[in-house]
Image: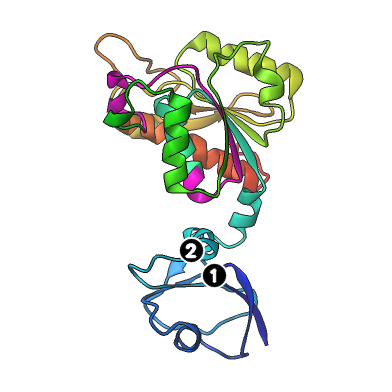
Amino acid sequence: MLNIQLNEQPFEAEEGGTLFGLRDAVKPEADIVILNGAAMSADATLADGDEVCLIKRGEVPSEDELEALMAARHTPGVHAKLKSATVGIAGLGGLGSAIAVALARVGIGKLILADFDVVEPSNLNRQQYFVDQLGLLKTDALISNLQKINPYVEVEAHAVKLTPDNIFPMFGKTDVMIEAFDRADQKVMLMQAFAARKPDVPLVTASGLAGFGPEETIGVKKMKKTIYVVGDLETGAKPGCGLMAPRVGIVAHMQANLALRLIVEKECPP
């Protein structure tokens, strides 16, 4: 017998069995068949350790099944590592709100969020909020949005302005910390705090994401042993060069992807 995962649960399949044969035996009505993270249109022979997911379009799964189906398109072995990880996000604007959404969608176990501000109209050009959330604390609005996306993510939110005196213990138990502030002095404050108190925790920060300049200039630079900067390190917001959703979104998703790599691969990019 083959030991495989079927909808994130252990399952014994027959030696020499095929993907579509498994579908026909277990859930013949499934019209989406996923093998090791890829949707399959052709049959394949099953191998030991394969991860298979069977989905019927339009079917609302049970609560027990939902999380497994959400993780179906992940690369094998990713979900368990993410589920046990905690990521901190300081600032819930264009960067932080998009980072939180991306990490919720990949199934991070816990998010610790901090922002003292409220949702206001100019935020809507790039931040992950809605018109009917204007005036709400960003922490409250984002919790509501994340629960609609992935109810299995634990969210701890703090509606406070971060200072050197309150960063810890608030962010004391994070596997990766993400800086998503607008102001340079806040960025420096967070980096100094982590360098002094949590020097082994990776800190992912951002610099240079304003306007609509070339996306290929955005990259990741390792500054110290555990500090990474995402952006072009040059293009700041100023008159004639504002903050816009596409470029902000590129940086936010690069920050989220770097956090994912640091959790899953335990490797530091150059």
- Which residues lie in the magenta part? 104-128
Q: Is residue 128 left or right of residue 191?
A: left
Q: Amino acid at mark 1?
A: Asn
Residue in the image at 66% along x and 26% along y: 171
- Give the secondary structure at mark 2: helix
Residue in the image at 61% along x and 46% along y: 109
**185 and 156: which one is in front?**
156
Residue 173 seen anywhere in this rendered image of the structure: yes
**4 and 11: which one is in front?**
11
Quadrant position of residue 14? bottom right
Q: Is residue 130 left or right of residue 10?
A: left
Q: Amino acid at mark 2?
A: Leu
In reply to whether residue 111 is colored magenta, the answer given is: yes
- Find the distance from the CA under tag 1 to the CA under tag 2: 7 Å
Q: Which mark is residue 69?
A: 2
Q: Earlier in the sequence, mark 1 or mark 2?
A: 1
Percent across and percent down for residue 64 are: 55, 63
- Crowding at dot 2, Cα within 10 Å, few <14 / some 14-19 / many 20+, comes out as some
- Crowding at dot 1, Cα within 10 Å, few <14 / some 14-19 / many 20+, comes out as many
Q: Which quadrant of the rendered structure holds the N terminus?
A: bottom right
Quadrant position of residue 136? top left
Residue in the image at 32% along x and 28% along y: 126
Residue in the image at 61% along x and 36% along y: 87
